[in-house]
Image (cartoon, rainbow, N blue to C red):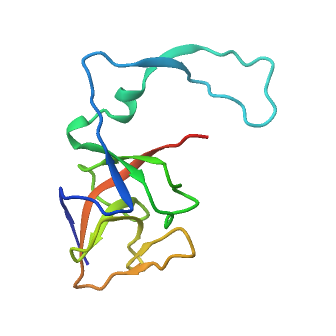
Amino acid sequence: MKIIKVAKGLSEELEMVPFKVSEQGVYVPYFEDGVQAGFPSPADDFKEQRLSLDARLLNKPNSTFIVKVKGDSMYPTLLVGDYLIVRADLNLEDNDIGILSVNNNDFTVKRLDKAKNILIADNDDFPNIEIDKDDVIQCRGVVKHIVRDL
């Protein structure tokens, strides 16, 4: 199996979403200590700071792109309508979720299992893609963040 980086179009399973990073970021309140998911402590102090979401999520604009999930082969990890923030400058590693093409087929989003030489569809209703030693995987980028409406 050979993995190469490419800058090519996507399949019908994904939709490209343009974004623009401006000179001034957009900052929102951020509570570094987080929020308790169990029993809250009355002694917890919320220390408000400022967080720029574009600086946090889009800090490499020349190698970052956003795609929208249109298929459900990666359910429950990825849902239809999720926005994926993808980095094209990163190498695809074991267990990473990437925007991938095998042997010049359409790009799809799958998880890499290097030990088993397969691209995993997290949804059991979809087949995994077995990778032969002569196959070429084109990697458009590695998924780093998911933005999802609740």
The reply, left or right, for residue 150 in relation to residue 138 is right
- Residue 2 position in % (x across, y down): 22, 74
Q: Quadrant of residue 45?
A: top right
Image quadrant occupied by the N terminus: bottom left
Q: Nearer the viewer, residue 28 or 115?
A: 28
- Residue 140 position in % (x across, y down): 25, 58
Total numbered labels? 0
Classify 100 as above or below 26: below
- Residue 33 position in % (x across, y down): 61, 24
The residue drawn where x is 22% and y is 58% is 9
Q: Quadrant of residue 115?
A: bottom left
Image quadrant occupied by the C terminus: top right
Classify 124 as above or below 91: below
- Residue 30 position in % (x across, y down): 54, 21
Q: Nearer the viewer, residue 42 or 7?
A: 7
The reply, left or right, for residue 58 in relation to residue 125 is left
The reply, left or right, for residue 73 in relation to residue 143 is right
The residue drawn where x is 39% and y is 31% is 56
Q: Quadrant of residue 116?
A: bottom left
The residue drawn where x is 72% and y is 31% is 36
The residue drawn where x is 79% and y is 27% is 40
Task: Residue at the far front: name it.
Answer: 12
